[in-house]
Image (spheres, rainbow, N blue to C red):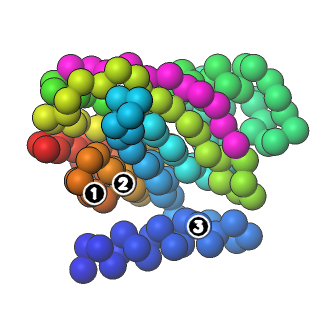
């Protein structure tokens, strides 16, 4: 039953490009690349939700759109993500680098990477993105590490998940 909900929400997120949304979800994919010993992270967030949240959080008036190449926007996105998304590997906070963003219709793709990953015994993910603005926000997390593939939700009530490999 839980998998059906996840599949439906994923389909809803990807097919919502031409509709006004009344739900609040994001999708974060975390993939371990053995060859480079890195975690590659892709986040999909509704542009208007992130823009409104950043403007409210930092008392700014930024506009997120493909034609706006402002370095200030990238800086504020990076700061916001760093304050609301974290990874712990083997109980140690693991830094990551904000690589950039891409726009697709009403979705913003954010790209992050964490390098030089030692063998992963435990992975703890915190994702409280947009939760302070939208109390019904659901952040879907999909991980793929070696043979382990898991999908789960993080919400206002539970925004941290620890996985043992």
Q: Which residue is mark 1?
A: 149
Q: Are marks 1 and 2 in contact (CB under 8 Å)?
A: yes
Q: Earlier in the sequence, mark 2 or mark 3?
A: 3
Residue 20 visible, this orientation: no
Q: Nearer the observer, disc 1 or disc 2?
A: 1
Local crowd size for mark 1, using a 10 Å CA cut-off: few (<14), some (14–19), many (≥20): few
The residue shown at (71%, 26%) is 73
Image quadrant where residue 132 sits: top left
Image: magenta residue range: 92-102
Tag 2 residue: 142
- The image quadrant of residue 95 is top left
Kindly identify the residue that appears in the image at 35 percent across and 29 percent down.
Answer: 37
Give how far across and how far down residue 67 sits, in percent: 87, 38
Our reading of the magenta stretch's main secondary structure is strand
At a point 81% along the width and 42% down the height, the residue shown is 66
Q: Quadrant of the N terminus?
A: bottom left
Q: Secondary structure at mark 2?
A: strand
The percent coordinates of residue 10 (x first, y second) are 47, 68
């Amino acid at each position: 039953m839980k998998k059906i909900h996840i599949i439906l929400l994923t389909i809803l997120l990807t097919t919502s490009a031409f509709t006004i949304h009344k739900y609040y979800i994001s999708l974060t994919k975390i993939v371990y690349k053995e060859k480079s010993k890195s975690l590659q992270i892709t986040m999909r967030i509704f542009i208007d939700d992130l823009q409104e949240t950043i403007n409210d959080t930092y008392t700014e008036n930024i506009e997120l759109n493909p034609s706006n190449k402002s370095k200030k926007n990238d800086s504020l996105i990076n700061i916001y993500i760093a304050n609301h998304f974290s990874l712990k590997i083997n109980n140690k906070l693991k830094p990551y680098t904000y690589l950039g963003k891409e726009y697709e219709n009403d979705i913003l793709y954010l790209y992050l990477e964490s390098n030089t990953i030692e063998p992963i015994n435990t992975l703890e993910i915190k994702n409280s993105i947009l939760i302070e603005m939208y109390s019904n926000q659901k952040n879907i997390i999909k991980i793929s590490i070696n043979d382990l593939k898991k999908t789960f939700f993080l919400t206002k009530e539970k925004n941290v998940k620890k996985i043992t490999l």
